Image: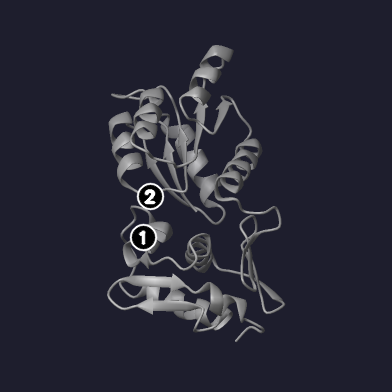
Amino acid sequence: MRILLVEDDHHLANTMLGMLRDGQNTVDWLDDGQQALGALTSEHFDLAILDLTLPRVDGLDILKAARKQGVQTPVIILTARSGLDEKLTGLDAGADDYLTKPFAMAELKARIRAVTRRGSSVPQNGLTVGQLVLNPDNGQLTSGGETTTLPRSEFQILHYLMRHPDQVATRRRLEEQLYGWDHGAESNALEVHIHHLRRRVGKETIRTLRGVGYLLDSQAAARVTECP
């Protein structure tokens, strides 16, 4: 999952980055409201964690502007503003959840799971396409009756493809899921990860559209009977 973290407290942000990345997440961090508004309205994220008191543009204004432009990205407000009126204002502006500081990281992670599960209609027992079942909480894939824990990169790719079955995912979109704004990946890394995934779910399940990207074929996924 690709997360946008908007937080101008650098110490807190660095702590959160370590904890959020200690899982199956790619996390991009911004500490400026104007930059955050641009990122949220122009790029794809699975979730945004948004502070309210930010340089240049207030977080509440970011949220209102993004929703006005049709951005549906789930947003969790994370702020020191703890008054009931402020909470109601944030939720009415389009936030999916509202958590006040100080907070426990375990609670934030639980709220992330709840918000993303609700937003993507992922059932409690995992994401299912055909005979493939992927558990977003622990990265485990069940395919053909066998269960394995996917490496982070393979999980990121398959998670995105299974959330958008029979839809083309461009190379750029998948690389964003993997690396965010970190451009240090080797040029053929995506192809290597796709190759390994096909060994797990079947070559026909993940199709290549040359020059465009990749597609998870739900009909082929329904025919998976055993791990290759």
Residue 64 location, x and y as percent? 38, 27
Q: Residue at x 39, y 58 (%)?
A: 179
- Residue 31 in the image: state x and y as whole percent: 36, 33
Residue 44: give its label: 2
Indicate whether 145 appears above or below 103.
below
Q: Is residue 158 left or right of residue 140?
A: left
Which amino acid does the dot numbered 1 rest on?
A: Arg
Residue carrying label 1: 173
Q: Residues within 10 Å of mark 2 (few under 14, many from 20)?
A: some
Residue nearer the viewer, 220 or 54: 220
Q: Residues within 10 Å of mark 1 (few under 14, many from 20)?
A: some
Of residues 14 and 107, the one nearer the viewer is 107
Q: Earlier in the sequence, mark 1 or mark 2?
A: 2
Marks 1/2 in contact by CB < 8 Å: the verdict is yes
Q: Which residue occupies the foreground of this view, 16 or 212?
A: 212
Residue sitting at 49 percent across and 33 percent down? 12
Circle 2 — which element? loop
What's the residue type where badge 2 is placed?
His
The x and y percentages for residue 17 are: 48, 44
In this rendering, the answer to whether 41 lies above or below 179 is: above
Q: CA distance from mark 1 to mark 2?
A: 8 Å
| Residue 68 relative to residue 50: left or right | left
Of all residues, the one furthest to the bottom in this rendering is 228
Give the camera-side residue of 39 and 74. 74
Q: Secondary structure at mark 1?
A: helix
**Visible residue check, residue 162:** yes
Residue 104 x, y percent position in the rendering = 64, 33
Residue at 50%, 74% in the rendered image: 217
Q: Residue at x 51, y 69 (%)?
A: 154
Relative to 166, 228 lies left or right: right
Q: Single out the residue that lies furthest toward the front.
A: 219
Q: Is residue 83 visible?
A: no
